[in-house]
Image (cartoon, helix red, strand yellow):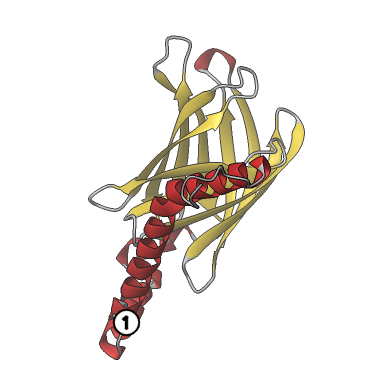
Amino acid sequence: MSADNRPNNAPKWFRRALVCFVFVATASAPLWWNAAGFAQERQAERQQQTPPGEQDMAEMMKMFEEAARPGEFHELLKPYAGKWEVSAIFGPPEAQQSSRGHATNKWVLGDRFLMQEFGGKMMGQQFSGIGYTGYDNTSRQYQSVWMDSMSSAMFVITGEASEDGKTITMTGQAMNPMTRQLQNYRHVQKLVSNDQYIYEMYEPGPDGEMMKTATLTYTRVE
C-alpha cells in the first residue's frame, strides 16, 4: 500500500482541532484586515492633523474675548443697580394680596451679571431670594436665574429687550409643584425712570391664556 493510500492514523481529536483552527482563521480574516485598515486610516488622519498656528490661536482668543466682554446690552441693565423698596401685588384680581420688601441689585464678575438679593414677606411668611441677570453675547439673549426660600428649584428664563431698551421680556418653563407638569412663564421688566421700575409675572390662567399673577414696583432708595 502506498503512502498516499494509507488510512489517516491521526487521532480524531487532532483532526477536529485542525478543522476548527482552519475555520476560525478563515472566518476571522476579514476582521483582522478591517482592523488593520482602520489603524492605518487613523494613523493617516493623525499625520494630517496639525496644531493650530499662531494666527489661528489669535483668532480663537479674539472670539472668546468678544464673547466675554460686557457690551451695549449689559449697559441696559445699569439703571437697575442700587437699593430699592419693593411694593408687590400677588394673585388674580379676585384674590389679590399685597406685601412689601426690599432689594439690592449689584454688579458682579466684572459688570457681567446683575445680582439681586431680595427680602420681604409673601403670604404672611418671611421670604428671601437671590437672582442673577446677564446678557449672553453668544446666544444674543438675556438670561436670568432665580432661587428663593419658597422653592427648591432654580427658575431660568431668557429673552430680549425692546428697541428702546426700556423693556426686557423673558420667558421660560418650570415644573408646577401641584401638577408636576412643565408650565410656561413670562416675566416683563419695565424701566419707568432712573428711580423706578416695574416687574410683572405672567402664567397660564384657568382658560390656558397667559394672565398677570404679580406686579412688583421697585422704588429707589440709593
Q: Position of residue 68 (x, y in %)?
A: 40, 71
Q: Position of residue 178 (x, y in %)?
A: 64, 18
Q: Amino acid at mark 1?
A: Thr
Quick one: 118 or 178, which is closer to the camera?
A: 178
What residue occupies the far left of the structure in this picture? 163
Q: Residue at x 47, y 70 (%)?
A: 111
Q: Residue at x 33, y 83 (%)?
A: 57
Q: Position of residue 107 (x, y in %)?
A: 53, 67
The residue carrying mark 1 is 50
Element assignment for label 1:
loop
Q: Residue at x 38, y 58 (%)?
A: 33
What residue occupies the far top of the structure in this picture? 207
50 left or right of 180?
left
Q: Residue at x 42, y 9 (%)?
A: 207
Label 1 Cα crowd, 10 Å radius (few <14 / some 14-19 / many 20+): few
- Quarter of the picture containing the C terminus is bottom right
Total labels drawn: 1
What residue occupies the far right of the structure in this picture? 125
Quick one: 132 or 79, which is closer to the camera?
A: 132
